[in-house]
């Protein structure tokens, strides 16, 4: 049976034993099914309040925070989505945590390293280990209880763990909503899957969270940056699935848009399938909708963001059938929405940490440049300086250097006039 021991002050005799298994068992009982979400939300609010107190060097609050954190993690790990029924309130909690973290890290930009996508179990284990190291070890030790927690509190004890917890909670809510949307109807509430309903205020909260996630991911540790990237894709997908269709001029147009919307949702569902051919089919369907300049895609910022996230995500796929289609889809998106997307594609190319991913983004950029024709001049001020910068910075990476030079060569073949104003920069860079 799992128990947490919290020593009050420095007296070994003054201690409180918290039977975690028993507590989780009570919350998971049939009698408390309706109340488990309320109790969990109360735990989150208590955890947040204790974190604020710990930030003022309150060592006792720091001890209590680690204790409550252990309980919260156990509840999330064992009861899962069941305790997330009050998703609007939990979204407000998530937004507050992420917004605070984004404000605290503003200006302290950290370049995210490339890390593999962590599973929920791995993240929970990491978070639990942190809590044990900072919580139980120094709760039982007199010297640490008096010193280390208090000094750590001055540096924002638990801030990173709270962000990881918030992102994991967000991911679980998004997974439940995604499953419900793909099922074509809202499921009834069950112990394993809460009923997820999205009204205007909830969707607005979700949009605000999407904005904050970008800031948090840019200025955080590699693990948080990776988790932000994964959850951002999930949020984009859910927002796209719940985006409305714009007004139509006739009933015929409305019927056509409904059919397009069903096609779009089916493509997103296919993209999330575990079978590679089905994933590729979903990407091809989305690409075809982009090439046709479907109103369902281009008149909704949220759906366009979701499509972009899908293409970018699958450029890194290990299966060539998937990533080659993703590359073609990115190029198609740049063709159809060049003014907005070409600068973004260039930024993605510059930001890639992995060589393989950058080469694949480069292939999409080559296709975009070659198909731009005389219109390349409109995008050249985004493309050429970025490529010159990549060439200057990658002399010790021949593969990346060759990729950047190849894109410049494609631009020169496509529209020599478009490159004329940068010849003084290009020539010495290539000569060097």
Image: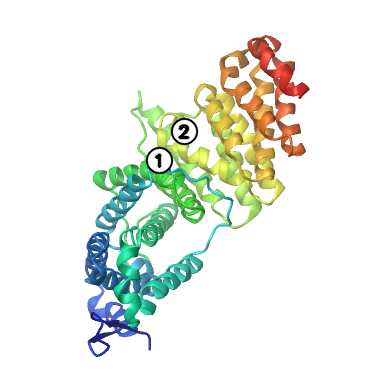
Judged left or right of residue 111, residue 162 is left
Judged left or right of residue 221, residue 239 is left
- Residue 374 vertical position relative to residue 29 in the rendered view, above or below: above
What is the secondary structure assignment of the residue under circle 2?
helix
Residue 350 or 416: which is nearer the viewer? 350
The residue indicated by pointer 2 is: 297
* The quadrant where residue 211 appears: top left
User: Whole-percent x and y of residue 318?
Assistant: 68, 52
- Residue 79 vertical position relative to residue 410 in the rendered view, above or below: below
Picture residue at 32% right of the left edge, 42% below the top: 208
Bin the neighbour count of mark 1 within 10 Å (Cα to Cα): few under 14, some 14-19, many 20 and up: few
Bin the neighbour count of mark 2 within 10 Å (Cα to Cα): few under 14, some 14-19, many 20 and up: many
* The quadrant where residue 14 appears: bottom left
Q: Which mark is residue 413?
A: none
Picture residue at 53% right of the left edge, 48% below the top: 112
Q: Which mark is residue 107?
A: 1
Judged left or right of residue 117, residue 107 is left
User: Whole-percent x and y of residue 160?
Assistant: 39, 58
């Amino acid at each position: 049976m799992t128990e947490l021991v919290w020593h009050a002050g420095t007296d070994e005799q003054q201690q409180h034993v918290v039977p975690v298994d028993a507590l989780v068992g009570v919350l998971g009982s049939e009698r408390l099914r309706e109340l488990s979400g309320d109790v969990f939300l109360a735990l989150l609010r208590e955890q947040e309040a204790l974190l604020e107190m710990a930030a003022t060097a309150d060592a006792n609050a720091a001890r209590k925070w680690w204790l409550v954190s252990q309980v919260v993690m156990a509840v999330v790990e064992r009861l899962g989505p069941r305790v997330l029924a009050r998703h609007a309130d939990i979204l407000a909690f998530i937004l507050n945590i992420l917004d605070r973290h984004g404000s605290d890290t503003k200006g302290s930009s950290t370049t995210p390293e490339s890390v593999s996508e962590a599973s929920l179990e791995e993240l929970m284990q990491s978070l639990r280990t942190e809590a044990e190291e900072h919580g139980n070890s120094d709760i039982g030790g007199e010297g640490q209880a008096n010193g280390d927690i208090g000094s750590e509190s001055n540096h924002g004890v638990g801030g990173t763990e709270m962000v990881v917890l918030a992102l994991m909670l967000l991911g679980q809510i998004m997974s439940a909503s995604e499953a419900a949307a793909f099922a074509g109807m809202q499921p009834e509430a069950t112990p394993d899957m809460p009923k997820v309903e999205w009204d205007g205020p909830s969707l607005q909260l979700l949009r605000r969270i999407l904005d904050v996630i970008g800031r948090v991911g840019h200025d955080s540790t590699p693990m948080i940056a990776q988790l932000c990237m994964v959850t951002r894709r999930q949020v984009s997908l859910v927002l796209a699935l719940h985006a409305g269709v714009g007004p139509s001029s006739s009933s015929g147009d409305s019927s056509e848009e409904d059919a397009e919307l069903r096609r779009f949702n089916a493509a997103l569902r296919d993209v999330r399938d575990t079978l590679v051919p089905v994933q590729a089919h979903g990407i091809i369907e989305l690409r075809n909708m982009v090439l046709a300049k479907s109103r369902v895609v281009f008149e909704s910022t949220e759906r366009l963001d979701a499509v972009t996230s899908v293409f970018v995500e699958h450029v890194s796929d290990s299966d060539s059938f998937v990533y080659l289609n993703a590359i073609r889809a990115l190029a198609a998106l740049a063709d159809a929405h060049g003014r907005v997307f070409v600068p973004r594609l260039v930024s993605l190319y510059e930001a890639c940490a992995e060589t393989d991913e950058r080469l694949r983004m480069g292939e999409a950029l080559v296709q975009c440049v070659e198909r731009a024709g005389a219109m390349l001049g409109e995008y050249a001020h985004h493309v050429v300086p970025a490529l010159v910068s990549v060439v200057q910075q990658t002399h010790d990476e021949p593969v990346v250097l060759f990729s950047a030079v190849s894109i410049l060569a494609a631009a020169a073949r496509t529209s020599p006039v478009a490159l004329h104003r940068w010849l003084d920069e290009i020539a010495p860079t290539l000569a060097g």
